[in-house]
Amino acid sequence: MIWLHRYATLVAAASLVLIVAGGLVTSTGSGLAVPDWPTSYGYFMFSFPFSNMVGGILYEHGHRLIASTVGVLTVLLAAGVWRVDPRRWVKWLAVVALAAVVLQGILGGVTVLYFLPAPVSISHAGLAQIFFGLVVSLALFTSPGWLRGYRATGSGGRDSAPPVTDDQVLRRLAMATSVIIYVQILIGATMRHTGAGLAIPDFPLAFGRVVPSDWNQAIFVHFAHRVGALVTLAAILTTSGHVWAHHRSRKELTHPALFLVALVVSQIALGGWTVLSGKAVAVNTAHVATGALVLVTSLVLMLRAHHSRFPGAVLLTRAAGVVRATLPDTHSSVVSSPSPEGRL
Amino acid sequence: MALGNVRVFVAILVIAVAAACGGGEPSEPMSAEPTGGPPATPLDPATAGNVTGMVVLEGTPPDPERIRMNADPVCVREAIETETEYYMVGDDGSLGNVFVYVKEGLGNRSFPTPSEPFTFDQRGCRYRPHVFGIQVGQTLEILNSDPTLHNIHAIPALNDEFNTGQPIQGMKFERTFENPEVMVPFKCDVHGWMNAYVGVLDHPYFAVSDGSGTFEISTLPPGDYVIEAWHEELGTQTQNVTVGEQETVEISFTFSIS
């Protein structure tokens, strides 16, 4: 199981690389550098000559190659989960992740063939974040900490720490924060794909004022993204503050909470820098990637806050070689020797 | 693993591979036969006049910037002109690459569509010409003279957008525009510095000012006209002119930059 977790983590890391690659495509204006799909200038994708990967083609075709690689990695991940993981809901989550990456590839092709229509490009960006979240979730659900229920293991394999407190307030705060972050990402994608990235050319003010005096669609979208940043910051500070106030001893909660605060502060700085630099490619792309990290960090915090509510929390006791499944709805325990398929 | 699960995974794998791969034919250029259009209005050349003139720029334009073509080693090797061409200004203030055309005054006249195509070339990783005019239904022949890939991406507002790859030197394909439009931008998404503009008109009365800022619109029927001059950075200007029988009218446009 540890190897499945490590592989899932690898796929998650590759997905982040893919998001960076996709961000570079838009940031460099290379979205239509390869006019055809699924071929590339008539070549089969994997036979396109490297010597021809010049200018915008480097970014666009490079993005396609990385995406295909992530697709294959996801196929193997799904196969591995079905083979190894006894939890049926995790198996189907892996299938959903696979379906998401296939759909994402199709969306990417459609947006090229129809000259980057904003709704399709925005959907492509939004689904990328969902896919990244799915893969990170799989890495989380297969992690030793999750499987142990975030209990410290003492000598002889006996549990020595109480389980995670069932904190309804934290669950709701973390979920709301994750939703707010995703909405903010969608607003950002809308701003990016409708050419509104510099609709307000100054920062932190807007045309020298707190609120713009003149409005058009681009200015509205851009300003909504700035307001969304403040809302996101408030949500993250509230959630993280709650963690520190009530769960200071729980590292599985405090670590993502602290990371989240650091990330959102960095993200706001990157957003301002993007505007002030006139959308410098590296800064702009870093802003996209950091946004993805903010989302998945909040997702991890949210899922960990919900840990006790997941079906079939499996506590693996290595020493005894016994699989103990605690069913949350009955509060009963089933003790059995693991079957060859490890089915729960 | 149960046989059923194997089948599921094979099906998923096939779908994933099919979505990622594919051996389609290269994009077919979308060409169309030049439209015949309505019958041409008879024109009496004995009465036709001309509009000639000059375009000048007052003020000092920004210096041209050197274009970094490092993204494509072929461009570094093949390029002849390596500076931006937003302003083509002579020592005497003459302004080139201004599209001058008859905007109003031709009434319901119709004009034959030229049978000869207009050649638009990609050479030295630049579009040549940078600004030009073409008639509705006239064949635009797009040529790649460079030993590197280009894509030709037109972004019109009133015509169909197209984006086609030309990976091979000597490759050419043809397009026509079905609606008048001033101006249609062109760009290359591979080489971001490449851009051009085409004015699409349903008549032949247009010209592009040359390096000396001069232009000529000839064989114009006598009448009252609105002549417009368009520049990619400086916008547009118009003038009203009256062309008499066999008369050559001289006008000038003065653009200003602060």
Image (cartoon, coloured by chain):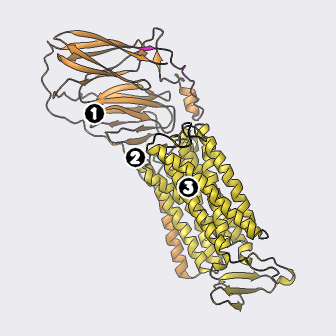
**Looking at the image, can residue A38 be seen?**
no
A199 shown above or below A232: above
Q: Point out the frontmost of discs 2 and 3.
A: 3
Tell me the yellow chain.
A
Apparent colour of chain B: orange
Query: Does B215 sit left or right of A337 as displayed?
Result: left
Nearer the observer, B128 or A248: A248
Q: Is residue B75 visible?
A: yes
Q: Chain of mark 1?
A: B
Estimate the spatial distance between the alpha carbons at disc 3 and disc 1, rounded to whole Å. Answer: 41 Å
**Label for residue B27?**
2
Residue kind at label 2, given as amino acid type = Ser
**Between marks 1 and 2 in the image, the one whose residue lies nearer the viewer:** 1
Image position of A305 with respect to B257: above or below: below
Which three-letter amino acid code belongs to the residue tagged 3?
A: Gln
Q: Main secondary structure of the magenta part?
A: loop
Disc 3 marks which residue?
A184
Is A202 drawn above or below residue A71 in the view shown?
above
Residue A296 image point, x, y percent = 63, 61
Q: Which residue is mark 1?
A: B180
For badge 1, the amino acid type reads Pro
Which residue does the image show at 61% across and 37% down from the upper left? Answer: A277
Asked whether the beta carbons under mark 1 and mark 2 sit within 8 Å of each other, the answer is no
Residues at discs 1 and 2 both on one chain: yes
Question: At 52% across and 57% down in the image, what residue appears?
Answer: A126
Q: Quadrant of the N terminus of chain B?
A: bottom right
Chain at tag 3: A
> What is the residue that sits farthest to the right in this orientation?
A155
